[in-house]
Amino acid sequence: MTVPSVLRQLHASLAAHAPDQLVTVLQEAGYAAGEGSYRGFAAWLRERAGVDSPANLDAGLLAEMLSDFCPARRRRRCASFRPACWPTFSGG
């Protein structure tokens, strides 16, 4: 099972069996996935921009890097689950 299919199944199961907990549980699952997503972005950023940490990225490049990161991940991991990916970012 892929992450998107797991989230869809979790959503369906919660909706059927614990609808009053659906939002809370999905929110917690999202928070739990956040650290892995951040680590993935940091590793991608090292390869793509030669920056050792997102904290060291020039703020003027952040929107471009975040926008570029999602399509790279979407091709590999979330082609069928658009909400898992970031939208295009723009500065200002």
Image: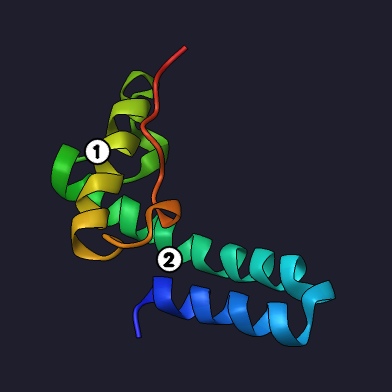
Label 2: which secondary element: helix
Relative to 14, 57 lies left or right: left
The quadrant the N terminus occupies is bottom left
**Front-most of residues 78 and 12:** 12
- Residue 63 percent location from the top left of the image: 36, 27
Query: Is 11 located above or below residue 84 in the figure?
Result: below
Q: CA distance from mark 2 to mark 1?
A: 18 Å
Q: Which residue is mark 1?
A: 68
- Residue 80 percent location from the top left of the image: 31, 62
Which of label 2 and label 1 is nearer to you? Answer: 1
User: What label sits on residue 36 in the rendered view?
Assistant: 2
- Residue 39 percent location from the top left of the image: 38, 60
Relative to 21, 78 lies left or right: left
Question: Which residue is painted at 60% across and 63% down in the image?
Answer: 31
Which numbered disc, 2 or 1, marks the residue that appears first in the sequence?
A: 2
Label 1: which secondary element: helix
Relative to 82, 28 lies left or right: right
Amino acid type shown at disc 2: Gly
- Residue 76 percent location from the top left of the image: 19, 63
Amino acid type shown at disc 1: Asp
Query: Is 46 located above or below residue 26 in the figure?
Result: above
Query: Is 76 located above or below residue 21 in the figure?
Result: above
Question: Which residue is painted at 67% across and 63% down in the image?
Answer: 27
Question: Which residue is painted at 60% across and 79% down in the image?
Answer: 12
Label 2 packing within 10 angstroms: few (<14), some (14-19), many (20+): few
Mark 1 and mark 2 in contact (Cβ < 8 Å)?
no
Query: Is 8 located above or below residue 75 in the figure?
Result: below
